[in-house]
Structures are given as structure tokens and as C-alpha cells.
Amino acid sequence: MTSAAPTFDASRERIPVRVFGGPTALIEYGGLRLLTDPTFDAPGDYPRGGGRFLTKTAPPRVPLAGLGPVDVVLLSHDEHQDNLDTSGRALLADVPRTFTTTGGAVRLGGTAEGLAPWQSVELARPDGGTLTVTAAPALHGPEGAEAVSGQVIGFVLTSPDLPTVYVSGDNASLDLVREVADRFGPVDTAVLFAGAPRIQALFDNALLVLDAAGAATAARILGARRVVPVHCDSWAHFTESREDVVKAFETAGLADRLQLD
């Protein structure tokens, strides 16, 4: 069943989204400050076993000290350093609530709360009313990848008087994007993880997250008025850049929907 989209005046409401690099973005929604997958370390290597590394290539655009208070972390998963690095992990202790996968909540403890796909939780808004956070299904790789790559979730933010925001997390499945669109579309703002990451030893080098063309297709499926691309810089295993996202959206006739700053 398709949910009715919240009523809002698009010319009046614009949800602030600030991108810090990698998968990390700050969303200000209904008076709350929500941070996606926190990564604030300096560039460096993260051992992954078997002589393999994940290499961070750029610092965050804003240092952790300049972040300010965070009310909620929306953590797509905790098992990969390009989504939760050392500084990001330490930050969780200072955040009142962290929503993540059910398995991730067990591993992290503290304020982490696990959400299964389509599970919702309501938060009180300091400006009045409530914000609903709904976990969206995600798949970190090709069909069957979960046994290797682990659980991942995305998020949908809704409130009766505010536009809908979708955060994809590390998702490579357009079929799951269609499920989100069926329930919540059209969305106002889609924070789409892209970058076409691939690791030669996994899944015959298949995509682990959407590539640029896939992100443009996801935007069309969702009917998104605005798209904020993240997870397409700062890590060596990302095979596409923000420039690739721009080119794909231009090709699809959707360039006017991109927010790049």
C-alpha cells in the first residue's frame, strides 16, 4: 500500500542537509540534528585482514570539533570503517540516540538501538510535534550479499508538516528503492549513497553500493525533488566520484535536482 505523502509547501520548506565527506551528512529536521554514518578520521589505512586495506584518502570537510551537538545518529551499519571510523565510533557515546541494524545495536551497545526493515520509532521534536524514523531495507552488494557484507539499513524521515527525507545507506538494490517509493514516494529529499565501491575479492567485483547511473535511476523511481549525493569521495575503493554523479544526472535530465554543496 502506498502511503500518502505529507502535505507541505515546497517553496517554503527546505530541509537543510550539509555534507561532510564520505557517507557523513548532517540533516536538520523539525529542530533535531541527525547525522548519517559518522566518519571524521584523518586519511589513512584500515586493515581488513588477508593483507587488504580500506584506505581513506581525504579528511572531513568539517572537523569533528566543528560539528556541534548531534541529537541522533542514523548509522546504516557498523561493520565497515568507511561508514563508521574510529572518531565516528567514539562520537556515538556523546549522542543521545543511535539507530542502526539489529546486529549493530548488539555489537555497539550504549545508546545504539536496532531497527528491523520497516520498523518505526517516534521522536519528540523540540519545535513541537513528532518525527518518525522508519528503517528502510538495504542490500550491501548483489543478491545474497548479506551473509558476507552484513546487515545494512536506510532510513525514511517523516512528519505531518515536513517533507519526506530518504537516506539510502549502503544500498545497491534498485528493487529495494522501489519498495521505499511504493510506501513513501514521492520523497522530497533523497540522500543517496553512491560511489560505485568495488572490492576485487568480493562478489566478482560487483557493485557494493549504487553507481552514478543507479543513483539517477533511484532519484527517478523516488520522484525526488532534491538529491544529495554522499559516499562518493574520500575512500580509495570508491570507483566513481561526485563528478561521475553529476554526469549521470545530466545524462538522465535530472541535473537540476542535485545539491552538491
Image: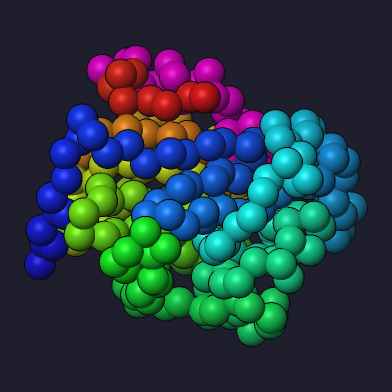
Q: Along the line of sight, which residue is nearer the eye, 151 or 74?
A: 74
Q: Is residue 43 left or right of residue 185?
A: right
Compared to residue 80, the image places residue 204 above or below, namely above
Q: Quadrant of residue 86?
A: bottom right
**Residue 239 spot, x, y in % from top left:** 62, 31
Q: Which quadrant holds the N terminus? A: bottom left
Q: How did the renderer colour the structure?
A: rainbow
Q: Which residue lies furthest to the front in this view?
A: 127
Question: Which picture quadrant has residue 191?
Answer: top left
Horizontal and vertical percent for residue 227?
37, 34
Seen from the viewer's position, the closer of residues 132 and 178 is 132
Identify the residue shown where x is 37% and y is 76%: 121
Residue at 67% from the left image edge and 49% from the top image edge: 68
Is residue 165 toward the left or the right of residue 260 in the image?
A: left
The reply, left or right, for residue 161 in relation to residue 72 is: left
Specify whether residue 95 is in view: yes
The mark tally for this picture is: 0
Res. 201 in view: no
Picture quadrant of residue 216:
top left
Residue at 52% x, 24% y: name it: 261
Confirm whether the magenta stretch covers residue 104: no
Decide: is 248 above or below 114: above
Q: Where is residue 127 in the image (x, y as percent from the top left)?
A: 37, 59
Magenta stretch bounds: 231-253
Q: Can residue 249 be found in the magenta stretch? A: yes
